[in-house]
Image: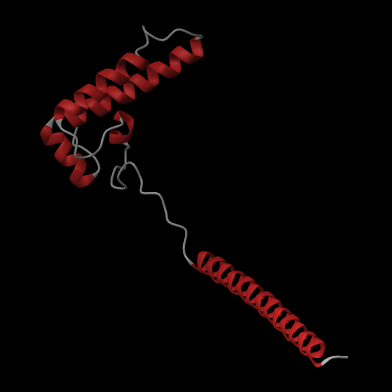
Amino acid sequence: MRREDSEAISRRYQDYSRFQQSAEEQQQRQWEKQQQGQERQRRQQQQQQERPTPRAKPKYPVNDPQGLYQLLEVDPKATNAQISQAFHRIAKKYHPDMVQGSVVEKAAAKEKFQKVSAAYQILKDPRRRGEYDTFGTTSM
């Protein structure tokens, strides 16, 4: 065998061994990336389990014991005009003369209409509304 042939074979072997090493290194890097990704996912899952679930902010205040603001579907900071608008909108919906349906549906609508009317009577009067906001009830 000639010296040139043996050098060529030696170079090919070296190239092959470098190629094999780089392939092994590449596989090692991929495996390490996978491990890092899995570890990251485990940490995120653990953090989510430790983190308390955020509660939805209530739409209506807790200090609305009789639920008057909720009945009229308004915010406690609503103006008199907004309260009046809400009342008229809901009153049209639940007025006993406007409800089409069975006797039971009309009775339920009448009861709801009376509750909405009572809430409106309290919240439209500034003095009674102040009492309700402060004490949770009114004198009348």
Q: Position of residue 11 (x, y in %)?
A: 74, 86
Q: Nearer the viewer, residue 89 or 5?
A: 5
> Which corner quadrant of the image does residue 17 belong to?
bottom right
- Viewed as shown, does residue 40 lie left or right of 114? right
Q: Is residue 42 left or right of residue 89?
A: right
Q: Nearer the viewer, residue 129 or 79?
A: 79
Quadrant containing the C terminus is top left
The chosen color scheme is secondary structure
Query: Looking at the picture, does residue 49 appear above or below residue 74?
Result: below
Q: Residue furthest right?
A: 1
Return the residue nearer the eye: 136 or 87.
Answer: 87
| 51 with respect to 61 (left or right) | right
Q: Residue extending furthest bottom? A: 3
Which residue is located at x 15 percent, y 35 percent?
128
Q: Vertical placement of 44 versus 99: above or below?
A: below
Residue 9 % position (x, y): 80, 85
Q: Looking at the picture, how far across and down is residue 104, in whole percent?
A: 50, 14
Q: In the rendering, at what x and y percent does residue 136 appear?
A: 25, 43
For the N terminus, the quadrant is bottom right
Which residue corresponds to the image point at 44% horizontal and 12% vertical from the top-left? Answer: 106
* Numbered marks: total: 0
Relative height, residue 4 to residue 39 (above, below) = below
Q: Quadrant of residue 121?
A: top left
Is 32 placed above or below 59 here?
below
Left or right of 51: which side holds 125? left
Give the residue drawn at x 59%, y 69%. Answer: 37
Q: Residue furthest left?
A: 127
